[in-house]
Each structure stands twice: as structure tokens, then as C-alpha cells.
Image (cartoon, rainbow, N blue to C red):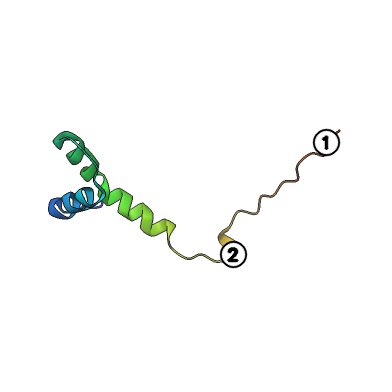
């Protein structure tokens, strides 16, 4: 399980963006930051064209 972001780092990030959160909201969001960072890393990984879905469709012609 990914480790959450350090509390000082998370607090600085939230303060920089001016997001008003209660302490409970802060801890709830901080608890999942490890998963968010892991997902962002997977999404930003360059992939070959073969990794793209091969599904295409053609819209129906107007009748």
C-alpha cells in the first residue's frame, strides 16, 4: 500500500492552492495521497501505440 504524502508537504500544497479544509477533511484526503500519486505515475508513463485500444466506430449517417 502506498505511503501517504508527508503532513508538512501536504499542508504546504493545500496552502499554496488556497483550499479551505477542516482538519478531518485534510486527514481524509492526505490518507489517499499515496494512491493518487501512484495512479498519476502510471497515467503519465509513455506507452507505445500498441497499448491503445483498437476500438473505432463510425457514426450513423443521417437519414
| Residue 50 horizontal side relative to residue 20, left or right | right
| Residue 16 horizontal side relative to residue 38, left or right | left
Identify the residue under disc 1. 62
Instruction: Return the disc, 1 or 2, that comes first in the chain's sequence.
Output: 2
| Residue 36 horizontal side relative to residue 42, left or right | left
| Vertical placement of residue 46 versus 1, above or below | below
Between residue 45 and residue 21, name the one nearer to us: 21
| Residue 29 circle label | none
The kind of secondary structure element at disc 1 is loop
The kind of secondary structure element at disc 2 is helix
Picture coordinates of residue 24 (x, y %)? Answer: 16, 34
Picture coordinates of residue 48 (x, y %)? Answer: 55, 66
Which quarter of the rendering shows the C terminus?
Answer: top right
Between residue 35 and residue 20, name the one nearer to us: 20
Instruction: Check if mark 1's residue and mark 2's residue have beta carbons within 8 Å.
Output: no
| Residue 49 circle label | 2
Tell me what residue is drawn at x 24 percent, y 42 percent: 19
Tell me what residue is drawn at x 37 percent, y 59 percent: 41
| Vertical placement of residue 25 versus 42, above or below | above
> Marks 1 and 2: which is nearer the front?
1
Picture coordinates of residue 10 (x, y %)? Answer: 19, 51
Q: CA distance from mark 1 to mark 2?
A: 32 Å
Tell me what residue is drawn at x 37 percent, y 52 percent: 39
Total labels: the figure holds: 2
Neighbor class of circle 2 (other Cα within 10 Å; few <14, some 14-19, many 20+) is few
Neighbor class of circle 1 (other Cα within 10 Å; few <14, some 14-19, many 20+) is few
Amino acid at each position: 500500500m502506498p505511503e501517504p504524502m508527508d503532513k508538512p508537504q501536504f499542508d504546504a500544497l493545500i496552502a499554496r492552492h488556497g483550499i479551505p479544509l477542516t482538519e478531518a477533511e485534510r486527514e481524509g484526503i492526505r490518507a489517499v495521497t499515496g494512491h493518487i500519486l501512484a495512479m498519476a505515475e502510471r497515467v503519465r508513463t509513455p506507452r507505445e501505440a500498441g497499448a491503445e485500444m483498437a476500438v473505432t466506430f463510425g457514426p450513423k449517417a443521417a437519414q
